[in-house]
Amino acid sequence: MPAADFYDDNVPLLAQSAIGQFEVAATPLQMAMVAAAIGNDGVMMTPHIVASVDDSDGRNVSTTRHVVSRTPVEFATARTLTTMLANVAANGTARNLAFDGVLVAGKTGTAESGVGDPTDAWLVGFAPVDEPRVAIAVFLQADEASGDLTGGADAAPVAREVLRSALEELLG
């Protein structure tokens, strides 16, 4: 990513960056953290992979603590974005993310990696909207065999099944 002052004379490139074009690059973990922060009222937590460790007798040896990383989004902004993302999942390009009994929030994306290359698919989101427990980012990289992929048609169904499974595990 260029330094901020690079855009002083390149306003069109700044506009492209706002929609993920030009030199914007993010990992699925970074995008899942964005979704999680929005669902967590603007508070970003430090990510972790292991929730807890048990010994061979099933006794808990350690539990990962939830640690606030920072607050990159104001509360009111996060709530507004949550409403928008829930609407995208209910009525917009992320309709394939929705499943019975759970209100979900999501945003689709279609990424271009080069001129003439097939488009890649993204979906970021979280669920349930009223009390988020799971955030997700799905990235599907296209190739010649797959052709163009889109967030709504290709990434959203994958995300839906992962969210459904994770919520069943967490909530029973």
Image (spheres, helix red, strand yellow):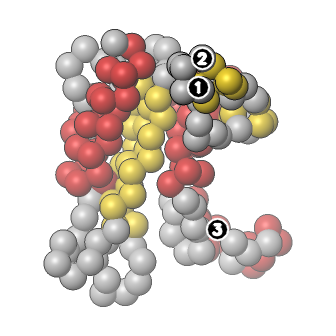
Residue position marked by numbered label 2 in the rendering: 59
Along the polypeptide, which appears first: circle 3 or circle 1?
A: 3
Residue position marked by numbered label 1 in the rendering: 54
**Residue 150: x, y in percent?**
27, 59
**Residue 137: x, y in percent?**
44, 47
Q: Residue at x 22, y 39 (%)?
A: 96
Q: Residue at x 52, y 63 (%)?
A: 20
Residue position marked by numbered label 3 in the rendering: 14
Q: Is residue 107 left or right of residue 23?
A: left
In this orientation, which residue lies closer to the viewer: 75 or 27? Answer: 27
Callout 3, which amino acid? Leu
Residue 33 quadrant: top right
Mark pair 2, 1: CA separation: 5 Å
**Residue 48: x, y in percent?**
63, 39
Q: Residues within 10 Å of mark 1 (few under 14, many from 20)?
A: few
2 and 1 marks in contact (CB < 8 Å):
yes
